[in-house]
C-alpha cells in the first residue's frame, strides 16, 4: 500500500460497571492505507463496530472508556484531539454509513438537502453551490435522475436506494476514510452486489479508504484488499485478502471460512430415498393457485380501497418427508405464503390443502389439523418466544394445550425436546433474554417440535444469526429431518443455505413462483433470468470468482416496478 | 460463539433493589405507612375521636407532639389512624380501575374492529366530561361515603388504563410470539391473558403508582367537600378541611395531615419510578 493514512496502535476500550471493568477492545492495532479497502470480519459482539466508533470517539454508552492507545490520522492523534477538532474530523475526514439507512437518514428532510447540509457545513459553500455539488454526488452514487431524486424523501426509496443516499451523505464532505458498518446486511443479494460494486468504484475514482465491517466473508473476499479478523475484542489475524483466504493461520479464521455457505457442502442435501419408498403418494401439502392480497390504504378521495397482491397464483406440492427451500428477495411473498399455508393470513382465492383437507372449504377442521400437525420457526429468535416465560414453561404450555402427552410425562418430554435441539436440560429454567440468539433459536425449534409436527415451516430462521451459528442451526435441521422424517419448508433469502439444506427449491418473485426444481439442477442451470441473477449475485468466498452485479438499470427492469421504485411512489 | 450467555436471573432482596434507589426508598416509605396503619391502636397515644375540651387547639408539645384540633383531639393519633383510611382509599381507588381498564384494553386491542371502535368511543364519552365533575355527580347520586367514592373511581378511572394497555396490545399482537401462539392452536383467552397481557402490563403497573397519588388527592378533595369520609372518622383530607378556619392561628391542624399526604404521595411516586426502571419501562 502506498501511504498509511490511519494508524491505530494498541487501542483498548473497557466498560465500567459496578463489578470489575471488562475489556471490550484489547490492544487493537491496525493500519489503513490511502485508497485501501480493509475488511473487518467477526461475529456479533467481537468489537468490530466498537472499534470503528472509537476511532471517531463516538462510543455508544457513557460506561465505555478508551483506556489507552493512539489513533493517528496523518500524524494527528484523534484520541488527544479537542472536541472541536473532532467535529471537523467526523464527517469531514471520516465518514460513516450504517446497516440500517432508514434510521440514519432524517425522514422529514429531502435527501438532496441532507447531502447539501454536509457540504455547506464542512466546505462552507453557499446554498446554490452546495445544491450543485449534491446533485453531482447523487449522480455519482448511481441515482438515475438526480434533479428529481434530490427532492425525494427517504421513505420514497427502496432499501438499496436509501443505502446509496446514505453513501451520498457520507461522501458529501469528501472524507478520506469511509467506515461502512454492515452496509449490505439488510439488503437483498442483488442489491448488495450493486452497493459493493459502487463502493469499489468510488474507491477507484477518488482514492477513498474504506473500512468495511461485515460478518460475511464472501463480501470481503469480493471487495477488500486486506482482511482483519476480530474475535472477543482482539484482532486474531490480519493479512492481505488472498493470503488470508488461501492460508488462514488462526483456528477461528479457518472455522469462519469453513462455515461460509458458498463453500460446497460436505454433506449433500437431505435425500429422502427411504422416505419416498415408504411414503404414500398423496402430498402432505398442496397449494393450488393461491392468491393473497392486502388492502394498501384507500386514496383520500377515491373511495375505492386499493389492494396489494402479495401472492399471485402460487401452486406448490410438498410430499411427506421432503425438504423444500423457498427463496426470493424481500417482498417476493415468501413469508405471506408461509402464513397463508398455516391459516394465519386470509386467502383471497385458491386452495390450500393439508393432508387432503382443504383450508378454504373446511376451514375449522383444517385449522385444527394444522395446529396439531404443523409448526413454525420464526426469524427473530428473541421475538418469537414470550419474554416473560421460561423455556420450560413455554414448552410445557404447548404440550398441555396440545394434549399429546400425559401431564405426568411433560417434564420428561421437555428434557427430551431440549436434548433433541442440543440444549442443556437446565435451559428449561432460563428466560429468552438470558440466552444467546442461537440458543433462543434452538428453543424456538424445540417449541415447534413439541407439537410433534409432520410439517415445519421455517421462516428466515437463520437470517438473524451469526454465520457459525447459522451453520449449526442448519445442521440441526438436517439432523432432525433425518431422525424424525420431518417435512420441512425452509424459507430463506440466502440461496447458499438453501442449496446446502434442501433437495428441492422454489424461487419466488413478485408473488409468483418463477422457477422450481431440484436444488442441484436449479443452481447449476437456472432457467429463469431472475434465478440466474440471484445466484450470480451471491458473493463467493473465492476472490477470483468475481461478483456479478447487474448494472443498475437492468436490475431495475428485472425487478419490475414495485419494490425498487426510483421515482417517488404514487 | 463469542456472545456468552448471561447467568440466569436470580430473584432476591439485593437483586430486587440493586442500584435502584428510587425503588428502595419508595418501598421503605410505603412500608412505614403500612406499619403505622396496621399497628395504629398500639402506636397512637390517644383515641383519635376522644375530645378534650380543656386542650382545644393546643400547640405541639411533649404531651401532644402534633398538637390538638378544635375539639381537643390529638392530631398525631388522628394522623396515624387516618393512615388506615387513606391507604385503603389509594388501594381500592386504583385496583378496580386497573382491573377493569386492563381487561377492556386487552379485549379492545386484541379483537380490534367493531369491538375496539365501540369501546374507544365509550372512553371518549367518559373523557369528554371533566373528571371531578363526573365523580361528584356519581357520588351525589349514590350518596356520600367511601364506597360511593370507590364506585365512582371504578366507573371513571379505568379509561387511562384501557388506553395504555390497548396501545401495547396493538403492538404486541403482531409480534412473532403472538403469531406463534396462534399457530400452536392456543385459545384466544390464553393468548390474550397469558401471552399478551403480561408483556403489556408493565406500563400500567408503573402508572398505578402515580395514579394512586392522584386518587389520594381526589379522595382528600372529595372528603374536603364533605362527600367522602364522614366526621368524626380521621382522614387526612377531612382533617385539612377542618383545620382550614384556623390556618392562621393554629397551623398545626392542617400542616401535619397535609404533610402526610405529601409523604405518602412521594412514596408512591418514588415506587412508580423505581418500578419503571425495574420493569424496563422508563428506558
Image: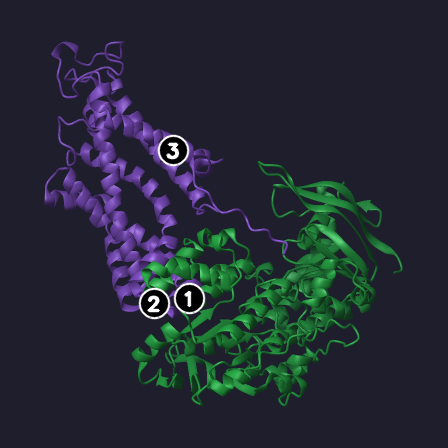
Chain colours: A green, B purple
Asked if one can make out residue A570 in the rendered structure from this viewpoint, the answer is no
| Label 1 packing within 10 angstroms: few (<14), some (14-19), many (20+) | many
Residue A270: percent from the left, percent from the top?
A: 58, 78
Protein chain holding label 2 = A
Secondary element at tag 2 = helix
Secondary element at tag 1 = helix
**What residue is shown with label 2?**
A402
**Marks 1, 2 in one chain:** yes
Secondary element at tag 3 = helix
Mark carried by residue A450: 1
In this rendering, which labeled residue sits more in front, label 2 or label 3? 2
Asked if the residue at tag 3 contacts the one at tag 1, i.e. Cβ–Cβ closer than 8 Å, the answer is no
Q: Quadrant of residue A564?
A: bottom right
**Marks 2, 3 in one chain:** no
Task: State left or right for residue B122 relative to residue A207.
Answer: left
Task: State left or right for residue A1 relative to residue A117.
Answer: right
Q: Residue shown at 19%/18% (left/top)?
A: B69
Q: Quadrant of residue A355?
A: bottom left
Asked if the residue at tag 2 contacts the one at tag 1, i.e. Cβ–Cβ closer than 8 Å, the answer is yes
The correct choice, above or below, for A273 with respect to A8 in the image is below
Asked if one can make out residue A502 in the rendered structure from this viewpoint, the answer is yes
Residue A151: percent from the left, percent from the top?
A: 60, 69
Residue A111: percent from the left, percent from the top?
A: 62, 65
Task: State left or right for residue A472 relative to residue A393.
Answer: right
Mark carried by residue B26: 3
Task: State left or right for residue A431 relative to residue B119.
Answer: right
Protein chain holding label 1 = A
Amino acid at each position: 500500500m502506498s501511504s498509511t493514512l490511519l494508524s491505530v496502535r494498541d487501542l483498548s476500550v473497557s466498560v465500567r460497571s459496578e463489578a470489575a471493568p471488562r475489556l471490550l477492545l484489547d490492544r487493537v492495532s491496525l493500519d489503513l492505507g490511502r485508497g485501501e479497502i480493509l475488511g473487518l470480519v467477526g461475529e456479533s459482539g467481537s468489537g468490530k463496530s466498537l472499534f470503528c466508533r472509537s476511532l471517531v470517539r463516538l462510543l455508544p454508552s457513557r460506561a465505555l472508556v478508551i483506556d489507552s492507545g493512539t489513533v493517528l490520522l496523518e500524524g494527528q492523534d484523534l484520541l488527544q484531539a479537542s472536541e472541536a477538532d473532532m467535529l471537523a474530523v467526523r464527517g469531514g475526514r471520516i465518514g460513516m454509513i450504517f446497516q440500517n439507512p432508514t434510521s440514519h437518514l432524517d425522514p422529514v428532510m429531502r435527501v438532496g438537502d441532507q447531502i447539501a447540509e454536509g457540504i455547506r457545513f464542512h466546505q462552507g459553500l453557499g446554498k446554490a453551490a452546495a445544491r450543485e455539488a449534491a446533485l453531482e454526488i447523487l449522480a455519482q452514487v448511481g441515482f438515475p435522475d438526480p434533479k428529481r431524486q434530490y427532492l425525494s424523501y427517504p421513505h420514497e426509496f427502496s432499501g438499496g436506494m436509501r443505502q446509496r443516499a446514505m453513501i451520498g451523505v457520507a461522501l458529501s464532505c469528501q472524507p478520506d476514510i469511509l467506515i461502512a458498518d454492515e452496509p449490505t446486511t439488510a439488503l437483498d443479494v442483488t442489491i448488495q452486489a450493486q452497493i459493493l460494486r459502487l463502493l469499489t468504484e468510488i474507491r477507484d475514482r477518488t482514492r477513498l479508504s474504506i473500512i468495511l465491517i461485515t460478518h460475511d466473508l464472501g463480501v470481503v473476499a469480493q471487495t477488500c484488499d486486506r482482511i482483519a479478523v476480530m474475535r472477543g475484542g482482539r484482532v486474531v489475524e490480519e493479512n492481505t485478502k488472498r493470503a488470508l483466504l488461501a492460508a488462514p493461520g488462526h483456528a477461528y479464521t479457518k472455522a469462519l471460512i469453513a462455515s461460509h455457505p458458498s463453500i460446497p457442502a460436505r454433506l449433500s442435501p437431505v435425500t429422502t430415498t427411504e422416505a419416498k419408498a415408504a411414503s404414500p403418494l398423496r402430498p402432505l401439502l398442496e397449494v393450488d393457485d393461491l392468491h393473497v392480497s392486502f388492502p394498501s390504504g384507500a386514496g383520500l378521495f377515491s373511495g375505492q380501497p386499493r389492494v396489494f397482491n402479495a401472492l399471485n397464483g402460487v401452486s406448490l406440492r410438498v410430499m411427506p418427508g421432503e425438504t423444500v427451500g423457498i427463496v426470493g428477495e424481500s417482498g417476493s411473498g415468501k413469508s405471506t405464503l408461509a402464513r397463508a399455508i398455516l391459516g394465519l393470513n386470509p386467502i383471497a382465492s385458491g386452495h390450500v390443502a393439508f393432508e387432503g383437507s382443504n383450508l378454504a372449504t373446511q376451514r375449522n377442521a383444517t385449522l385444527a389439523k394444522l395446529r396439531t400437525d404443523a409448526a413454525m420457526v420464526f426469524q427473530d429468535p428473541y421475538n418469537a418466544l414470550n419474554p416473560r416465560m421460561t423455556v420450560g414453561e413455554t414448552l410445557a404450555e404447548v404440550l398441555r394445550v396440545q394434549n399429546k402427552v400425559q401431564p405426568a410425562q411433560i417434564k420428561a418430554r421437555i428434557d427430551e425436546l431440549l436434548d433433541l435441539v442440543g440444549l442443556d436440560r437446565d435451559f428449561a429454567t432460563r428466560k429468552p433474554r438470558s440466552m444467546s440468539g442461537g440458543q433462543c433459536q434452538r428453543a424456538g425449534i424445540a417449541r415447534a417440535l413439541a407439537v410433534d409436527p409432520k410439517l415445519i415451516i421455517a421462516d428466515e430462521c437463520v437470517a438473524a444469526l451469526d454465520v457459525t451459528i447459522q451453520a449449526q442451526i442448519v445442521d440441526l435441521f438436517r439432523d432432525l429431518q433425518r431422525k424424525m422424517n420431518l417435512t420441512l419448508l425452509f424459507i430463506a433469502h440466502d440461496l447458499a443455505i438453501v442449496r446446502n439444506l434442501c433437495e428441492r427449491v422454489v424461487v419466488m418473485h413478485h408473488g409468483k413462483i418463477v422457477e422450481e426444481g431440484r436444488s442441484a439442477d436449479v443452481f447449476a442451470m437456472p432457467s429463469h433470468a431472475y434465478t440466474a441473477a440471484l445466484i450470480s449475485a451471491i458473493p463467493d468466498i473465492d476472490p477470483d470468482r468475481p461478483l456479478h452485479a447487474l448494472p443498475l438499470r437492468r436490475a431495475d427492469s428485472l425487478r419490475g416496478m414495485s419494490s425498487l421504485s426510483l421515482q417517488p411512489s404514487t | 460463539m463469542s456472545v456468552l450467555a448471561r447467568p440466569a436471573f436470580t430473584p432476591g432482596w439485593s437483586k430486587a433493589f440493586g442500584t435502584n434507589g428510587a425503588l428502595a426508598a419508595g418501598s421503605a416509605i410505603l412500608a412505614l405507612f403500612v406499619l403505622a396503619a396496621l399497628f395504629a391502636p398500639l402506636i397512637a397515644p390517644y383515641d383519635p375521636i376522644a375530645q378534650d375540651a380543656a386542650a382545644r387547639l393546643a400547640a405541639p408539645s411533649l404531651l401532644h407532639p402534633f398538637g390538638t384540633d378544635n375539639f381537643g383531639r390529638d392530631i398525631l393519633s388522628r394522623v396515624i389512624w387516618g393512615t388506615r383510611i387513606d391507604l385503603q382509599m389509594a388501594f381500592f381507588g386504583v385496583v378496580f380501575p386497573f382491573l377493569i381498564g386492563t381487561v377492556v384494553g386487552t379485549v379492545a386491542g386484541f379483537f380490534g374492529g367493531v369491538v375496539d371502535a365501540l369501546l374507544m368511543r365509550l372512553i371518549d364519552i367518559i373523557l369528554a366530561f371533566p373528571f371531578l365533575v363526573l365523580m361528584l355527580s356519581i357520588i351525589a347520586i349514590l350518596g356520600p361515603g367511601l364506597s360511593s367514592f370507590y364506585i365512582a373511581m371504578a366507573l371513571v378511572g379505568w379509561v387511562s388504563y384501557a388506553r395504555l394497555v390497548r396501545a401495547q396490545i396493538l403492538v404486541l399482537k403482531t409480534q412473532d410470539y403472538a403469531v406463534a401462539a396462534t399457530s400452536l392452536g392456543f385459545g384466544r383467552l390464553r393468548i390474550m391473558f397469558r401471552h399478551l397481557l403480561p408483556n403489556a402490563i408493565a406500563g400500567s403497573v408503573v402508572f398505578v403508582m402515580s395514579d394512586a397519588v392522584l386518587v389520594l388527592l381526589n379522595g382528600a378533595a372529595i372528603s374536603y367537600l364533605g362527600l367522602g369520609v364522614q366526621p368524626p372518622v380521621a382522614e387526612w383530607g377531612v382533617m385539612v378541611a377542618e383545620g382550614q378556619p384556623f390556618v392562621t392561628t393554629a397551623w398545626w391542624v392542617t400542616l401535619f395531615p397535609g404533610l402526610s399526604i405529601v409523604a405518602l404521595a412521594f412514596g408512591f411516586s418514588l415506587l412508580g419510578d423505581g418500578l419503571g426502571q425495574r420493569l424496563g419501562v422508563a428506558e
